[in-house]
Amino acid sequence: MRIPSPTRFAVVSLSLLLTACATAQAPSTPAAPAPAPPSPGAIAALESRSGSSVTGRATFVQQVAGVEVTLEVAGASPGRHGAHLHATGDCSDAEAKSAGPHFADEGQPHGGPTHVAHHHGDLGNVDVGADGTGRLVLLLAGVMLAPGPHSVVGRSVIVHADADDLTTQPAGKSGARVACGVVVATPAP
């Protein structure tokens, strides 16, 4: 049986086209993963208050489950020192009273950062060594860096003279405010 001329032309053309595509196809390589977008961040530079020599820095990085906080202090007396986020981003007072009360946007009682009920601003205690330095790293659930009532940006980080007992209301009997820094958003890279 003979194929009519126009049909034969179409079959040959299709055959040639498929052959060309098969031979010209580049070997497949796996696609590189897309780079992760930079995490939004914020920072607070802590300055001495209440006649102390305590300084430091707090950095904040947005994570899926909340905000990771890294608090570093220097010039503090050895031992435990309460650390909190306070409601107002104002460290202008010599005793940091301008920072207001703890950041407690849900009306929860004061407690430790791992307690079921606690302020969003309860960071717990930073342990300071004999050299006067200390570091605290924790994840704060329920807060964010984006604007809104749960944002840490625009708040103040306070380091206190004494340890936070994590129970006494409203602030854990942690004593004078010896360092203060306002939380500000860092620009995207």
Image (spheres, helix red, strand yellow):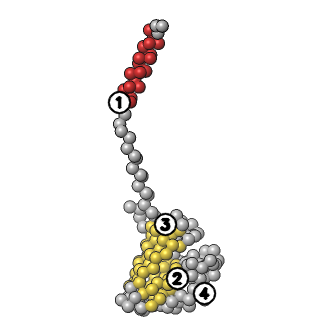
User: Could you give the CA–CA distance between mark 2 and mark 3, rounded to whole angstroms?
Assistant: 19 Å
Q: Identify the residue under disc 4.
A: 167
Question: Which residue is tagged 3?
Answer: 62
Residue indicated by mark 1 = 23
Above or below, 129 relative to 141? below
Which amino acid does the dot numbered 2 rest on?
Gly
Q: Residues within 10 Å of mark 1 (few under 14, many from 20)?
A: few
Question: What's the amino acid at mark 1?
Answer: Thr
Residue for point 46% across, 76% down: 137
Quadrant (top left/top right/bottom left/bottom right) for the C terminus: bottom left
The tag earlier along the polypeptide, 1 or 3, is: 1
Disc 4, SS: loop
Please tell me which residue lies in front, 146 or 133: 133
Q: Amino acid at mark 3?
A: Gln
Q: Earlier in the sequence, mark 2 or mark 3?
A: 3
Residue of label 2: 124
Determine the CA span between mark 1 and mark 3. Answer: 49 Å
The residue at 47%/74% (across/down) is: 69
